[in-house]
Image (tube, rainbow, N blue to C red):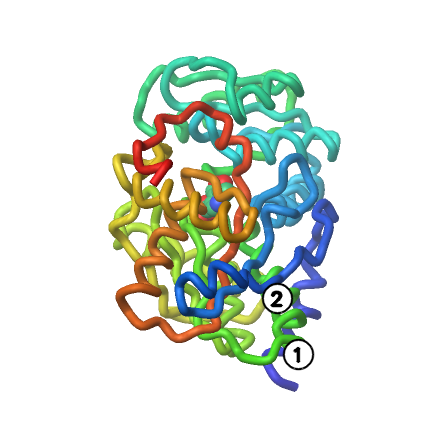
């Protein structure tokens, strides 16, 4: 039996709550491909069918199953006020009967974008008052201790859902993609995506090794230094593959830097231009924090590296931040 054929059965043994509408479409981005001179395909995980969609729905399918199997009655997680992750975590936890609690770094901000959606569903939110992203980690532990003191059983998930269990979502997505790729004429060379906390990239990297894919996974960091996210992705890929009993040792991780722009969470001029091009050519809106910056990196590679296609681009969602009134660059209109 090949590694490839063992993988579906190995994954089946891990608990999963069905949340997403799958498979998400894989389609050619014809006009963008013409514009860039490279064949580009979009894997539409903005269309996962929960809330306003996004990659984290796949992550949550495994995390929530784990929470339920541990008998937890609430979920504690955190990130920035405009986090797509916390929004989808709260939404899906509520659907699974777990009360969501969210910790945000910094001070309270106006209810826009994801925060507005949180308010709409009544998520319990507290702000750390500290602008450091890592302040969320201590805040979550403190909150979990308080909840335990009240007799609650919290499931605590780190920022981005970046755990080995969460990374399994994109191991499974890779199987879905493999079926879709079998029906297209040419084997893709690379799969590009935005890397934030790294769980999505880690699942794809682990599966790329296990499935011996034709493509290499290329992550574009939008928040952390290249060395840090490279190590994080490698660690999560190994740990996720160990969970399913198919360990992947020292996977090769390709992370591109230089695309964060002014800072994590703020739009960049290159990202805004990339998003505008994709909207005009493909009628797809990329979010300014993740997708736009990853696309800016891909466009640059197409124009400067003579990249060989076909290329897959993971459209990972994040629609609420299109309406978060994040500072936009003047480049948006160019
Ligand atoms: C829209 C969107 N794309 C990409 C990512 C990056 O995923 P990861 O944190 O797993 O690297 C995120 C993370 O929240 C996201 O919200």
The residue at 66%/64% (across/down) is 11
Task: Report the disc number at residue 5.
Answer: 1
Contact between marks 1 and 2 (CB within 8 A): the answer is no
The disc, 1 or 2, on the residue closer to the chain's N-terminal end is 1
Crowdedness near tag 1: few (<14), some (14–19) or many (≥20) residues, C-alpha within 10 Å: few
The residue at 66%/35% (across/down) is 51
Give the secondary structure at mark 1. helix
Pick the front one: 255 or 69: 255
**Residue 76 x, y percent position in the rendering:** 55, 29
Foreground mark, 1 or 2, reads 2
**Residue 82 x, y percent position in the rendering:** 47, 28
**Residue 158 x, y percent position in the rendering:** 47, 38
The response on whether ligand 1 sits within 8 Å of label 1 is no
Pick the front one: 272 or 35: 35
Pick the front one: 248 or 34: 34
To which quarter of the image does residue 124 belong?
top right
Q: Is residue 76 above or below residue 293?
A: above
Q: What residue sits right under mark 2 in the picture?
A: 177
Give the secondary structure at mark 2. helix
């Amino acid at each position: 039996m090949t590694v490839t054929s063992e993988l579906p059965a190995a994954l089946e043994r891990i608990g999963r709550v069905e949340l997403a509408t799958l498979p998400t479409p894989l389609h050619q981005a014809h006009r963008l491909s013409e514009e860039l001179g490279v064949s580009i395909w979009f894997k539409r995980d903005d269309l996962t069918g929960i809330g306003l969609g996004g990659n984290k729905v796949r992550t949550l399918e495994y995390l929530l199953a784990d929470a339920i199997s541990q008998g937890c009655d609430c979920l504690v997680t955190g990130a920035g006020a405009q986090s797509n992750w916390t929004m989808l975590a709260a939404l899906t936890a509520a659907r699974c009967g777990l009360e969501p609690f969210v910790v945000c770094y910094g001070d309270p901000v106006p209810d826009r974008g994801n925060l507005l959606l949180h308010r709409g569903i009544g998520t319990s939110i507290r702000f750390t008052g500290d602008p450091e992203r890592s302040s969320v980690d201590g805040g979550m532990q403190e909150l979990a201790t308080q909840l335990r003191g009240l007799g609650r059983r919290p499931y605590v998930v780190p920022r981005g859902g970046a755990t080995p269990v969460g990374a399994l979502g994109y191991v499974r997505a890779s199987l879905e993609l493999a079926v879709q790729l079998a029906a297209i004429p040419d084997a893709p060379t690379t799969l590009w995506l935005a890397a934030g906390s790294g769980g999505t990239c880690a699942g794809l990297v682990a599966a790329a090794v296990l499935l011996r894919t034709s493509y290499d996974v290329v992550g574009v960091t939008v928040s952390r230094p290249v060395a840090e996210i490279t190590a994080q992705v490698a660690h999560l890929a190994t740990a996720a593959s160990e969970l399913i009993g198919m360990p992947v040792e020292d996977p090769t991780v390709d992370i591109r830097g230089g695309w964060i722009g002014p800072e994590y969470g703020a739009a960049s001029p290159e990202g805004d231009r990339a998003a505008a091009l994709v909207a005009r050519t493909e009628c797809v809106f990329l979010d300014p924090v993740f997708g736009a910056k990853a696309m800016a990196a891909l466009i640059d590679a197409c124009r400067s590296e003579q990249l060989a296609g076909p290329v897959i681009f993971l459209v990972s969602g994040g629609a609420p931040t299109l309406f978060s009134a994040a500072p936009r660059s003047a480049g948006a209109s160019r």
